[in-house]
Amino acid sequence: MATTRTPAAVGLTEIERAAETIRGGVRQTPILSAGEISRRVGATVRIKAENLQRTGSFKLRGAQNRLAALNRRELDAGVVAASAGNHAQALAVAARSRGTRAVLYMPEDAPIAKVEAVRGYGGEVRLVPGSYDDAAAAAGEAAECDGLILIHPFDDPVVLAGQGTVGLEIADQAPETRLVVVAVGGGALAAGVAIAVKAKLPVVRVVGVQSDACAPYPRSLAAHRPIGARAASTICDGIAVKRPGELTLPLVSEFVDEVVTVSDDDVAQAMVLLLERSKLVVEGAGAASVAALLAGRIELPGEGEICALLSGGNVDAARLVECIRLGETASGRRLVLSTVVPDRPGALARLVGTVAEQGANVLDVVHIREGVDLHVRETGVRLVLQTDGPEHGGQIVAAVREQGFSVVTE
């Protein structure tokens, strides 16, 4: 990647010092084999399971390192931050361990599981109407008015050094790694990991991944300055940061080799695969690295291993169900079939029986009598089916048509 070189605000020395500082306060998370992912990608893929970190994400590393740098007067004042969820949870835990108060401003539409977790860890939650940017403005105002210490989620060298400790662990646990794939939100994790892993394993490439619904880094890197992006709704809420940091952008430019994007469909399929085959619950942002590999967005190394970093696993049950549905639909394992049947006894049974003979699982049946062009003796039927994949879905549609039913699929 073409870069404008700037002196590194954080280097290996700061990251190694952070590792000593936070030792005992965070877990060394495992690197796990991923056989099915490797088979689909066509290379040896291992996964760094930061979703198994305390608080469910890598954010605890930076929060612990940052609070360790505060003096007693600052700790007595208390800390404040804005967060969509993971930074808030991490800061609440770190503050509790340091005996200080943590006030967390969160968007009012933040996942309920994350809000409740923050409260459970002892954080004081302030819900703010609007986006993360609105929460950030409120946190900044609270810092000025109430004398609280503002802890930025990514644009802080001490936080970044803490996140970089993940890279030290990758180099130590998986020295055969030749490619590291990591999600990019604000950029502290990607920059910190790249600085650390390249210092230890100089042959490694590092590729960042953003959601195509909110991807400011590609344009910002090309322009060599932070450029904001419009954020659309995405299941990757943990990395939906509209603007790169003043600190993180130069470091990502210098140390990260490439930044690619993925769709929500790609991410949902990765979440389902990680759940089914690796038995890991991973949030959208956490699955972005695997999604990029499965979608073929990244050039694979000629030799060695790939390490995909699962940055977090904080997803509430309702969102997880939505992601499973989206993932199954995107992979062709969920088929929505609409047709019209005569309004007489046995017609619906013949339709459902035909589907059952093909081995499909009927998840939902809806009668539609309004809003469609129907004869007085007809009724519309919408079936939601679970299939074995696109080929199986095609067989089901063909069988239903052979029985004389018209079929429209969604």
Image (cartoon, rainbow, N blue to C red):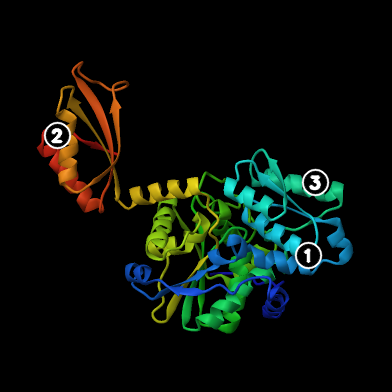
* Residue at x 71%, y 57% (from the top left corner): 92
Residue occupied by mark 2: 350
Residue occupied by mark 1: 98
Q: Disc 1 vs disc 3: Cβ atoms closer than 8 Å?
A: no
* Residue 175 marker: none
Binning the other alpha carbons within 10 Å of mark 3 as few (below 14), some (14 to 19) or many (20 upward) gives some
Q: Farthest top residue? A: 376
Residue occupied by mark 3: 141
Q: Between label 2 and label 3, give the one nearer the viewer.
A: 2
User: Which one is nearer the viewer's eye here, 43 or 254?
Assistant: 43
Residue 193 percent across, percent down from the top left: 59, 72
Q: In the rendered image, is residue 355 in sight?
A: yes
Residue 233 percent across, percent down from the top left: 52, 44
Query: In the rendered view, would you say 129 is above or below 273?
Result: above
* Residue at x 58%, y 49% (from the top left corner): 113
> Which element type, helix, strand or loop, lies under badge 1?
helix
Amino acid type at circle 2 is Arg
Amino acid type at circle 3 is Glu
